[in-house]
Image (cartoon, rainbow, N blue to C red):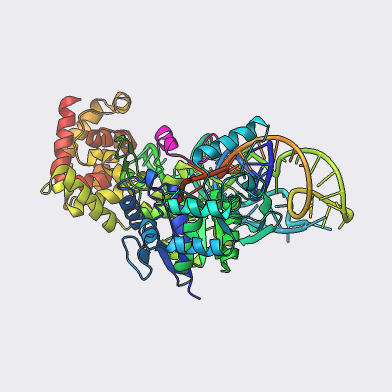
Amino acid sequence: MTIRTRFAPSPTGPLHMGGVRTALYAYLFAKQQGGSFILRIEDTDQNRYVPGAEEYIIEALTWCGIIPDEGVGFGGPHAPYRQSERKHKGFYLDYARQLLQKGNAYYAFDRPEDLELARKNAEAEGVQGWQYDASTRMGMRNSLTLPEQELKHLLDQGTPYVIRLKVEPGQNLTFRDMVRGEVSFDSSLVDDKVLIKADGMPTYHLAHIVDDIMMEITHAIRGEEWLPSAPAHLLIYQALGIAMPQYAHLPLLLKPEGNGKLSKRDGDRLGFPVFPLQWEDPISGEISSGYRERGYYPEAFVNMLALLGWNPGSEQEVFTMEELMAVFSFDRVQKAGARFDPAKAKWFNEQRLRAMRDEELGLRFSLQLKQMLGEQDPRADVSFATTAAGLLKERVQFENELYETGKYLFEAPSAYDEKVIAKRWNEKAKVFFEALTETLSKTEEFTAEQCKAAFEKLANEQGIKPGDVLQLFRVIVSGQGSGVDLFGMVALLGRAEVEARIRRALASL
RNA sequence: GGCCCGUUCGUCUAGGGGUCUAGGACAUCUCCCUUUCACGGAGGAAACACGGGUUCGAUUCCCGUACGGGCUACCA
C-alpha cells in the first residue's frame, strides 16, 4: 500500500508556523515511505474565506521546500482538491445519503435560533453544556420526531435543513493514535454533529472523511485540537463500513511566555514572526511579519520547526530536509505542547549560515550589495563580497546583518572610538602612523601576512610594543575598537584605501 | 461546568523500575584563547509538579490532587 498523507488547511488567513509544522511532518512521513503528500484546501465555510490566503499557503509551502505531489496548484488524479469545487460534484451529499439510508444520519430542521433557545433553557436549569444528542434529539424538529407526512411536506417545500450524524450512546470508542497510543471516548458524550449545513456545504467532519476516502489517504495528520472530535470521525467511518486511516494528533505550539497557544499577536508583541511569509491583511491592511522577510533561510526554519515537538533520539540537531526524511518518526513526537523559543530559532539560522561556504555566501552577499550600492560598485564585487563575508561570517546570525556588522569595510569611518583614542593616542603613536603609510606602501604584495610583518617591523624599529598601536590601527581603519580580523580587513580594503584612511585619521586626531 | 490530552533544568528535550552523582542543545554566568569583538575551548548554576500506592527499590508503573493545554458552532 502506498502511503498518502495530506495537509488540509482552510484559507482563512496566512498559514501559521504551527500549520507549517503539521504540513512538514505529513510531508516527511510520506516522503520517507516513498508515498505522496497532498495539499487539499478546505474552504467549506464561505463566510471565512480570505482572498489571497490560498496563494499564500502554496507560496509558503514552496518556500519551505514542502512540495506537494498533488493538490491545489499542483494538479493530480484526484482533482479537484478544493472542497468548494468537490461539493459541486456532489461527493459529500452522496456520502451523506448513504448515512441517511443506513439510519446513521437524519434531517434536522431546527433553526439556529431554536438551538440557541434550547441552550439557553438548559442553562437556566443549570445544565452547562447542552448538546444535540441522544438525550435531546427527540425533543427537536427532525426526521426522527416529525411525522412522515410532515417530513415529506417540509422537504418538498424546500425548508432549510441540516443533516446530522446519529450517534448511538453507550459505546466505547477506541482507536490508536500514532503519537498518543490508545485513546478512548464514551459515545454518550459525542454530539450529533452536523454533516451537511443548511447552505448545502459539508462541515469539516464529513468533508475531510469523504475526501480522505476518495483521495486514498492512509495517514491523517492534524493538530491536537481535533482530538475531541476524533470519536465522531471514527463513528462516521464505522457507519460507512470503511477502515479509518491512521491518525496522528500533533501537540500544539505554545507562546514563548505566558499561557496558551502561539498566536498572531505574540509575534508582534515579542518581536518574532509567527508566519513563514509576510502577510498583509486584505481588509485591515495590517502587516504580519514573516520568517522569509526577516532573513531566515527556509532550511533553518524547517529545521527549527522539525525539532519543536520531535527529536531524533540522537544528539544531532542540525538537519537537512533529506536527513529529516530519513529519521523522522511519529513515535518520537512529543505528547505535550512545545513552547516556542525565538532565540533557538535564530541559532538554527546561524548554524545554516556557518555551514555555507564563503563562496556561496559571498555570491549572495554580493547580490545584496549590488542592490544597495549599485551594480557597478567595486565593493559589491563578488571577490570583495566573498572575502568580506568570510571575515564577517562568524559574527552574524543572519545574512542581512552582514552589511551593518561590517559597515566599516564599505565606508571609511566618520568618527573614532573615543575610549581607545583617549587611552592610546599620543605623540609616539602619531609618529608611528605617520611612518606606517610609507612602510605599507613598500610591501611587495598587500596581503594580510605582509602588512602584519611590515607593521610589526616598524613598531620594533620605533621601540613600540605592537600591542600599544594595534588597537589604535583598528580604530584608525574602522573607527571601532573591535571587529573583524585587523590585517584581514586591511588586506581587503587595499593599499590605497588604507593609506587614505590613515591620512584622514592623522588629520582629524 | 463537562470531556479529552498532557506535566524532566528558564526553553526545546534524552532517559526510563536499580547504570541517575538525571545527559544534550539554546539562553545565562566564569575562565582560557585573541590586538579587540566574535568564533572556539573548558567549566558553573539550573529540572524528574505534589500526595498516596505497587515494589527490596520509583523520576520511571498505577491512582488521586494541582497545574497547563485543547474541545464543548450549521468554524476549521
Residue found farthest to the left = A376
Q: How many marks?
A: 0
Residue A491 position (above or below residue A507): below
Residue A71 position (above or below residue A251): below
Residue found farthest to the top = A422
- The residue nearer to you, when weighing B27 against B58, is B58
Measuring 62% from the left and 33% from the top, which residue is drawn there? Answer: A121
Residue A294 in view here: yes
Measuring 23% from the left and 55% from the top, which residue is drawn there? Answer: A363
Q: Split into 4 quadrants, where in the image is the C terminus of chain A?
A: top left
Residue A307 percent across, percent down from the top left? 50, 53
- The residue nearer to you, when weighing A2 against A347, is A2
Measuring 45% from the left and 48% from the top, which residue is drawn there? Answer: A159
> Taking A326 as reference, is A503 left or right?
left
> Magenta includes A268?
yes
Residue A115 percent across, percent down from the top left? 55, 40
Residue A156 percent across, percent down from the top left? 45, 54
Corner quadrant of residue A382: bottom left
Residue A468 percent across, percent down from the top left? 32, 33
**Magenta segment boundaries in residue numbering:** A255-271
Corner quadrant of residue A183: bottom right
- The residue nearer to you, when weighing A129 against A382, is A129
Residue A251 in view here: no
